[in-house]
Image (cartoon, grey):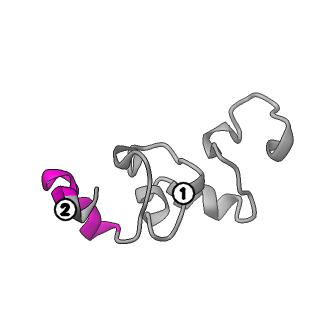
Amino acid sequence: NTEACGWDGGDCIEFNEKYPGCDVYSTSNIGDGECGGGDYNTQECGWDGGDCIEFNEKYPECDVDSPSNIGDDQCGGGDYN
C-alpha cells in the first residue's frame, strides 16, 4: 500500500480515501465485526471501522491488544485483569 506500488495496484485506493493515515498490517480487519486493538483502534482507522466504538464507550481507559478478550468468560491476567 505505497505510492510506488500504485496503492497495491489500485486495491487500496478506497481504503486510503476512507481511512487516511491508517497504517495497519491487514486492512481487511478494519470493519470486520471484531474490535481489534493497537493500531486498529485509532481515530485514523475509524476506531477499527466502527468495530471498537461500543468497547471504547464502555471501557474508555482500557488499552489492550485484544479488546475481544474483555468479557469473554475467561479471567485474563496482565492488562486484562
> Which span of residues is magenta-colored?
5-19
Q: Which mark is residue 39?
A: 1
Residue 6 vertical position relative to residue 69 in the rendered view, above or below: below
Q: Quadrant of residue 61?
A: bottom right
Which amino acid, by three-letter code, is at mark 2?
Ile
The number of numbered badges drawn on the structure is 2
Q: Which mark is residue 80?
A: none
User: How far from the left and from the top, in percent, is residue 16?
Assistant: 28, 65
Most foreground residue, 26 or 67: 26
What residue is disc 2 on? 13
Left or right placement of residue 30 versus residue 8 in this view:
right
Q: Residue at x 49, y 43 (%)?
A: 34
The C terminus is located in which quarter? top right
Left or right placement of residue 43 versus residue 16 in this view:
right
**Magenta highlight on residue 48:** no
Q: Secondary structure at mark 1?
A: helix
User: How far from the left and from the top, in percent, is residue 56?
Assistant: 62, 61
Q: Main SS type for the magenta part? A: helix
Q: Quadrant of residue 57?
A: bottom right
Q: Quadrant of residue 26?
A: top left
Which amino acid, by three-letter code, is at mark 1?
Asp
Question: Whole-Å distance between the Cαs marked 2 and 1?
Answer: 19 Å
**Magenta highlight on residue 10:** yes
Most foreground residue, 45 or 21: 21
Assess disc 1: are there few (<14), some (14-19) or many (≥20) residues with their C-alpha within 10 Å of its C-alpha: some
Q: Residue at x 38, y 51 (%)?
A: 31
The N terminus is located in which quarter? bottom left
User: How far from the left and from the top, in percent, is residue 22?
Assistant: 41, 64
Q: Secondary structure at mark 2?
A: helix
Residue 11 vertical position relative to residue 22 in the rendered view, above or below: above
Left or right placement of residue 67 versus residue 30 in this view:
right
